[in-house]
Image (spheres, grey):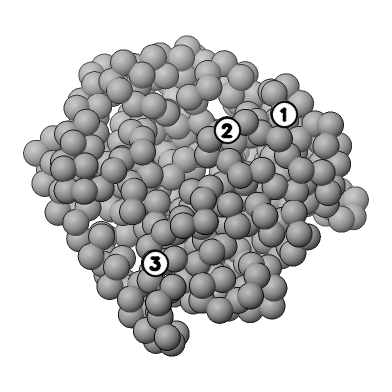
Amino acid sequence: MNVRSITCFVNAGGPGANAAARAGRLARDAQAALEAAGLPVQSRRLATQPLSSLPGDPMAVARAVAAEGAAAGFEYVSLGPVLAAEPGAGLERLALIPELIRGNDSTFTSILVAGREAGINLAAIRQAAAVVREVAHTTDQGFGNLRLAVLANVGPHAPFFPAAYHDGGGPAVAVALESAGLAVEAFSPAGSLDEARGRLVAAVEGAAGRVAAVVEPLARDAGARFAGIDFSYAPFPDEARSVGAAVERLGVERFGAPGTLFAASFLTGCLRQARYPHCGFNGLMLPVLEDAVLAERSKEGLFTVNDLLLWSAVCGTGLDTVPLPGDVTEDELAGILLDVAALAVRLDKPLTARLMPVPGLRAGDVTAFEFEYFANGRVLDVKGAGSAGVFRRASHLAG
């Protein structure tokens, strides 16, 4: 099992000019200690407070944060979301996002459009859909949308990008694990569901204990809060570390067949049963283009966007790296985002949408990204013509 990310959380643009440097030292120390304990670390990442609350000129602050993060040894920086869930929330900074994405290949950001108490901001969803479409048509193959997510009911200190952001308090650190392989290993020899659950829960608790024992004292010594571990089943594009493979090892013949919802719920339930310091999502991730088996099953036509939405009800993160036709309309994108927001608010769980319209491709075509962390898959169809009538009738829906 690998550590996907050591994510440090700091305030950007304020008086603490050395915040990124201090966080960088903590992240380097944590990486060295984790790797000495036999846990390879894929990346070190830095996340800031929401874009909505960055002081001064947000573009200037964003450039400074990216530079400071790189100098401190962070591979990626997440500028926190535009907070757009509240009724009447200012949406002006949404217009900055395409330029932020185009301006730096290591910068991520997001848009928070719904929350349990705030409800659903339909006006923000419409504008978020427009941003996704603009990024798709102004970056190569729409690849910029890898670094943009629309969030619903997502709190601070989730270590996975693009959803990571700081709450504006003191510095913090959290760890994201790449744990789909643990599920594959646990399920492969199991003779019963009870044995599969027991093996996986034991593996999760053992790995989490090793991580916490290393990172928590380092954080304390550095004056940072240890926010916890996100043990979401994050995959890697090979079968040995695939969520789809774990589902199939559990007994579903092919991912997407009847029984997939049960398997997704079973996997998530194992994490709920395991005891460790939680943060973030802690559920099943289904990133279509980051999982070798999901990508292959998409080519076989075994699931749709609506299926992914259904599974989101029992999974962790919602719609992730979902390839869509390049001519998908703003109304269609807004309808998908509205469904994600509705699930998040109704079920009181964090969900995100990382949608990837690919210019020039139609439903059924296969993507051709040249990216080491992707497995190319089939562009999924978007049925219908969107939900424009809903948006004409309201700009906000209370939670």
Task: Name the side, left or right, on which 149 lies relative to 62.
Answer: right
**Mark found first going from the N terminus, 3 or 1:** 1
Q: Looking at the picture, how far across and down is residue 116, in whole percent?
A: 53, 59
Residue 371's label in the rendered image is 2
Identified by mark 3, the residue type is: Glu
Left or right of 34, for residue 234:
right
Q: Which residue sits at x=31%, y=16%? A: 71
Q: Report the residue at 54% width, 64% height from top.
A: 245
Point out which mark residue 233 bears: none
> Mark 2–mark 3 contact, CB under 8 Å?
no
> Closest to the observer: 335 or 324?
324
Give percent across and percent down for residue 362: 86, 41
Q: Amino acid at mark 1?
A: Gln
Q: Residues within 10 Å of mark 1 (few under 14, many from 20)?
A: many
Which element is circle 2 on? loop
Look at the image and tell me whether residue 176 can be seen: yes
Q: To which residue does mark 3 refer?
A: 185
Q: Distance of mark 2 from mark 3, alpha carbons?
A: 26 Å
Q: In front of the other: label 2 or label 1?
A: 2
Answer yes or no: is residue 113 visible: no
| Image coordinates for residue 44, horizontal then vertical, percent | 33, 33
Image quarter for residue 365?
A: top right
Give the amino acid type for the residue marked by disc 2 in the picture. Answer: Phe
Which residue lies under the disc numbered 1? Answer: 141
